[in-house]
Image (tube, rainbow, N blue to C red):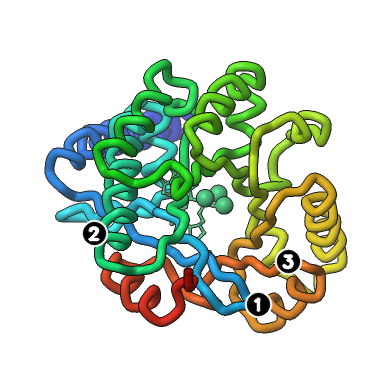
Amino acid sequence: AKELGRNNCQSYTSEMNAKVRDRLRRQKQLGEALANGEFRVVYQPQVDTRSDTILGVEALLRWDHPVDGPIPPMTFIPLAEETGLIVPIGEWVLRTACFQGKAWQDAGLPAVTMSVNVSARQFLHDEWVSTVARALSDSGLEARHLELELTESLIMQDLDGCIETMKKLKEMGVQLSIDDFGTGYSSLSALKHLPIVRLKIDKSFVRELPQGEDDRAIVMAVISMSRRLNLNVIAEGVETQEQVDFLRESDCHEIQGYYFSRPVAPGDIEVMLRERGEVG
Ligand code: C2E
Ligand code: CA
Ligand code: CA
Ligand code: CA
């Protein structure tokens, strides 16, 4: 039994070592991915179901590893956050998205809001506001066409610091929204004081609509709260006609999800914008 225990212990240790090595390898690859041009940004439309027009797009990062193939954001974003690599990578996403948004406008397509995800490490960085200002002035995209998606956990990490930064961005004309709403612990009283324009209902609440009773109640509550606080509300992860119908009946007309389109390459968005961009 003693023998066995030691063996178990050894294999456990070598397994751990393998995991650590794996992680370090991935970390190193991630550090080189930007310079190697392995990242690209895809865009997912945000649609108004009343007018059937595209109001905006969300920029989503993709990493195509030359050997291992596509690596899901769920895997590499946390790694980028832990290592701090999210700061340069996130800046690249922001700049790519701003230049893309401007390029669509220059091509004569209807202007849409460009939404970009922001991690805590980026938002709480001293240089963040000037990074955003530079991305806007270099690209020529107007601030009102840029929206930054923040999570509740990011905001609650340093509420006062965040509000200060949010106010600066708002003064510049940038729009702010809360992503994955309902999954964090932001207090409603804090929400009232945040300079945000929009809540995004997390897809975990949308998944089981319209059957899931709890989810129905939560989604309806978030929508009516948004109305009272004068916030726009969008549901993410919308996949079915039944979900669209339920949301519409609940007075939520903005949706994002596979129902309308998956995140796609810029050229595909261009085609959609020609057909369904907002007029005027
Ligand atoms: P998120 O910000 O909540 O983005 C929405 C996610 O839902 C995306 O996953 C999108 O592809 C997926 N999605 C869209 N429609 C549907 C649908 O109808 N059904 C389902 N099941 N999923 C749908 P993705 O692209 O894998 O990104 C995962 C997460 O990675 C994002 O969640 C975001 O937190 C993070 N992320 C992605 N790009 C960036 C980035 O540039 N910066 C930062 N900081 N985070 C990013
Ligand atoms: Ca998001
Ligand atoms: Ca989300
Ligand atoms: Ca999320």
Does the residue tagged 1 have its C-beta within 8 Å of any atom of ligand 1? no
For marks 2 and 3 on the same chain, the one whose residue lies earlier in the sequence: 2
Label 2 vs label 3, nearer the camera:
3
120 or 105, which lies in front?
105
Amino acid type for the residue under numbered disc 3? Cys
Residue denoted by label 2: 69
Tell me the tag on residue 50: 1
Q: Amino acid at mark 2?
A: Gly
Left or right, residue 125 beside residue 239: left
Q: Residues within 10 Å of mark 3 (few under 14, many from 20)?
A: many
Residue 8 is marked as none
Q: Are discs 2 and 3 less than 8 Å apart at CB? A: no
How many angstroms separate mark 1 from mark 3 (CA)? Answer: 10 Å
The residue carrying pointer 2 sits among few (fewer than 14), some (14 to 19) or many (20 or more) residues within 10 Å by Cα, namely few
Give the residue drawn at x 15%, y 54%: 66
Q: Helix, strand, or loop for circle 3?
A: loop
User: Could you say which disc has been placed on residue 252 in the image?
Assistant: 3
